[in-house]
Image: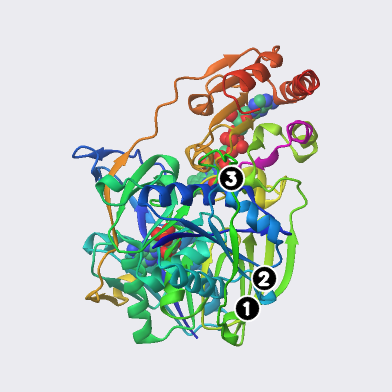
Amino acid sequence: MSVIVLVEHSQGVFKKKSLEAIQYAANIAKSMGTTVTAVATGNVGNSEMQALGQYGAQKVLHTTDTRLDNFNSRAYTKVMLAAAQKESAKVIVGLHDTVGKAVSPRVAARLKAGLVAGAVSYPDLSKGFVVKKNAFAGKAFAFVNITSDVKVITLMPNTFPVVKGEGSAAVENLDVTFEDKDFSIQVVEVSKASGSVPLSEAELVVSGGRGMKGPENWGVLEDLAKELGAATACSRPVADSHWRPHNEHVGQTGGTIRPNLYIAAGISGAIQHLAGVNGSKTIVVINKDPEAPFFKAADYGVLGDVMEVLPRLTEAVKKFKAAHS
Amino acid sequence: MKILVCISQVPDTTTKIAFSDNNTTFSSAGVTYIINPYDEWYALVRALELKETGVATDVHLVTVGKADAEPVIRKALALGGDEAIRIDIESNDTYLVAAQIAEYAKTVGYDLVLCGKESIDYNNGAVGAMVAELLDMNYLGFAAKIDIAGTTATVKREIEGGEETDSCALPLVISCQKGVAEARIPNMRGIMAARTKPLKVVAPAAIDALSTIVSYEMPPAKSGVKMISAENMDELVALLHTEAKVI
Ligand SMILES: Cc1cc2nc3c(=O)[nH]c(=O)nc-3n(C[C@H](O)[C@H](O)[C@H](O)COP(=O)(O)OP(=O)(O)OC[C@H]3O[C@@H](n4cnc5c(N)ncnc54)[C@H](O)[C@@H]3O)c2cc1C
Ligand SMILES: Nc1ncnc2c1ncn2[C@@H]1O[C@H](COP(=O)(O)O)[C@@H](O)[C@H]1O
């Protein structure tokens, strides 16, 4: 019996959200009186894997087949199934991201395990195995009880703060038997967005709407994002008008994000926009219309013209950083 | 080539969400149900385009749900498609839904299964990948563009921090999002035609749900916005540091 968790790295460095997933899995394991095994693939160093112990992993199962360097859900499902069998896994944790959303349901289907997708709480074991999850695009939460013996959870990234502790994980090799068909998807082309911080992982996000008036005005928004180390996002009409790339579009039909800070500049706050961002911990709204609906969903509001407020805010952040460095 | 499009019914995007019976039941009173936008605008329309261009021979639509799901699947048929299948069981567990679809799909043998990237009610984004596993097929999630030539699909899709184009032999399951197609409006001819198109009601396979929703909760109400003077961005930064603790 154990809890296993799939972890992702970028060029040999584990992603913060994967550390969060390990810590999450470790806390579940503790309440069940068992241990956590992380499952890692590809080219990642031993010391990096051992360091996962600082977040609660007792063991890391590592599989190195180079064909896994291109993610594909079928092969990764085999990896997780092999790990689940080896560890007699009772709970299987992944992230609610593009990788986890492709692998976890497959693993769940294969093991006939109930799935909670997009968890935002620890399971409540006093009532069975009840996990809180996002529903109705952030307008509500649902509490889902998994009734099968094995349980699969995808954790919403950025739900719990990551705390580094002590410990070192034991690294073991994981043998997985693949078939040719597990690698039958050919990658033709990959293009990574040039932005420094990927939106889905960003803790701080500066976002612009139609109130920015045109793509030529985005400089003031990007300056602020750069000063904060934030990612940039936008409303749907902005992406539809090609002012900004489509991968920046957030909302019901775009990406769902839950950063610590979401700064919305010149965005009215339509319900479909809020659907993608109202999980943000703190929301700052800059709008020249006091009646803009977004103010109702905001923690801090600034009534004013984005072209004046954004540069002032950038200056204030600069000053703050100078004083705190 | 046969395509199966998975259609789910969801509350309209502007629905005011409310619960009854001590927060254990979703209140459907006054709620308008629509086709899940990702299924309608992207998966279904792309399937229709593939039929119109002669790539696909058959486009079938499937929904897992009780009789109350019928108006929505009829609406989908009005956009196009040759026949619709309703698998007659309550659809409240992801595994149950996926396994019902997979069982039905096996009886027909589809080359391509299209679904939406997620249903906008429970936001799981899980049915497509589960169906793929149960049918032992490849799965490509978050497609933004789908082309089929012969028996090979070329799919541009979202990956973490960017985009990837993949090529893969059919059969295949793909989840669709923005970019795959342009939304269509049903016309009178389609609506009339849909009336005579077959809507098969299929008895569910013996499959147990593996989860149940026990209750709901509304997010805590925001304590109210704190307005900061546009002249005083230092104060905003200070509050973000000391009060919100986000910078
Ligand atoms: C089914 C459906 C799905 C949708 N999905 C999405 C989605 O995923 N994401 C999304 O964003 N939208 C989505 N929409 C669209 C959504 O309803 C809104 O139309 C959209 O969010 C509005 O974008 P906006 O706030 O940028 O523009 P607007 O509504 O035009 O608002 C612009 C705002 O900027 C303010 N402003 C103007 N000039 C200035 C200035 N100089 N300084 C400060 N403020 C200024 C105005 O007061 C106004 O509040 C969807 C709609 C539908 C029907
Ligand atoms: N009850 C259902 N019947 C048919 N297809 C469904 C059903 N529920 C979900 N789907 C399909 O699966 C996709 C993902 O849904 P979900 O995993 O529920 O977020 C949807 O966009 C639909 O295409």
Do the residues bearing badges 1 and 2 touch, measured as CB atoms within 8 Å? Answer: yes
Residue B65 x %, y %: 27, 64
Q: Earlier in the sequence, mark 3 or mark 2?
A: 2
- Secondary structure of the residue carrying tag 2 is loop
Give the number of the disc on residue A15.
Answer: none
Q: Residue at x 43, y 80 (%)?
A: B135
**Viewer-nearest of labels 3 and 2?**
2
Answer left or right for A27 relative to B232. left
Q: Do tags 3 and 1 sit on the same chain?
A: yes
Answer left or right for B9 relative to B241. left
Residue position for label 2: A70
Q: Earlier in the sequence, mark 3 or mark 1?
A: 1
Figure quadrant of residue B70: bottom left
Q: Residue at x 45, y 56 (%)?
A: A35
Which amino acid is tagged 1? Answer: Ile
Which amino acid is tagged 3? Answer: Val
Residue position for label 1: A185
Residue position for label 3: A250
Quote the CA–CA distance across marks 3 and 1: 29 Å
- Secondary structure of the residue carrying tag 3 is loop
Q: Earlier in the sequence, mark 1 or mark 2?
A: 2
Quote the CA–CA distance across marks 1 and 2: 9 Å
Mark 3 burial class by Cα count in 10 Å: few <14, some 14-19, many 20+: many
Render colour scheme = rainbow
Mark 2 burial class by Cα count in 10 Å: few <14, some 14-19, many 20+: few
As for residue A229 lying within the magenta part, the answer is yes
Q: Does the image show residue B42?
A: no
- Secondary structure of the residue carrying tag 1 is loop
